[in-house]
Image: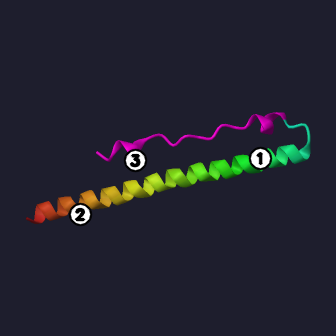
């Protein structure tokens, strides 16, 4: 099995209350922009976990191939 750290759930950043309760367009746009940045950062982190899983799997497959050839 892969390391537990790579199987952890990727947390979703909460929707900021300012986004749901903004009374003017500037406040809404600022909250929306900040939220999109945090969503993209979370997605980048999740994609890094998936890349680490692929690398782990490749190492395990290589070890199994080496063991089968011995």
Indicate the position of residue 64 as horizontal and vertical percent values: 19, 58
Q: Which residues are magenta?
A: 1-21
Residue at 90% x, 37% y is 23
Q: Position of residue 53 (x, y in %)?
A: 38, 54
Above or below 20: residue 44: below
**Looking at the image, how many numbered discs can be counted on the residues?**
3
Q: From the image, state whether disc 2 or disc 1 is nearer to you.
A: 1
Question: In the displayed image of the protein, which residue is found farthest to the right?
Answer: 24
Mark sitting on residue 6:
3
Q: Is residue 35 left or right of residue 26?
A: left
User: Tag 1, which secondary structure?
Assistant: helix
Give 1 or 30, whichever is nearer the viewer.
30
Q: Is residue 11 magenta?
A: yes
| Residue drawn where x is 32% and y is 47% of the image | 2
Question: Badge 1: few (under 14), some or many (20 or more) residues near its Cα, within 10 Å?
Answer: some
Q: CA distance from mark 2 to mark 3?
A: 19 Å
7 on left or right of 43: left
- Location of the N terminus by quadrant is top left
Kind of element beneath mark 2: helix
If you read the primary sequence from the N terminus, does the residue marked by circle 1 or circle 3 appear first? 3
Q: Earlier in the sequence, mark 2 or mark 1?
A: 1
Q: Mark 2 = which residue?
A: 62
Please give the label number shown on residue 32: 1
User: Which of the 4 quarters of the picture holds residue 66?
Assistant: bottom left
* Label 2 Cα neighbours within 10 Å, binned few <14 / some 14-19 / many ≥20: few
Taking 46 as reference, is 18 left or right?
A: right
For the point 70% across and 50% down, which residue is it?
36
- Residue 24 found in image quarter: top right
Give the mark toward the camera: 2 or 3.
3
């Amino acid at each position: 099995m892969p390391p537990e750290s790579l199987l952890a759930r990727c947390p979703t950043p909460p929707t900021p209350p300012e986004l749901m309760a903004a009374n003017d367009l500037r406040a809404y746009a600022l909250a929306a922009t900040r939220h999109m940045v945090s969503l993209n950062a979370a997605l980048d982190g999740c994609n890094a976990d998936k890349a680490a899983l692929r690398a782990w799997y490749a190492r395990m497959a290589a070890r199994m191939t080496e063991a089968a050839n011995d």
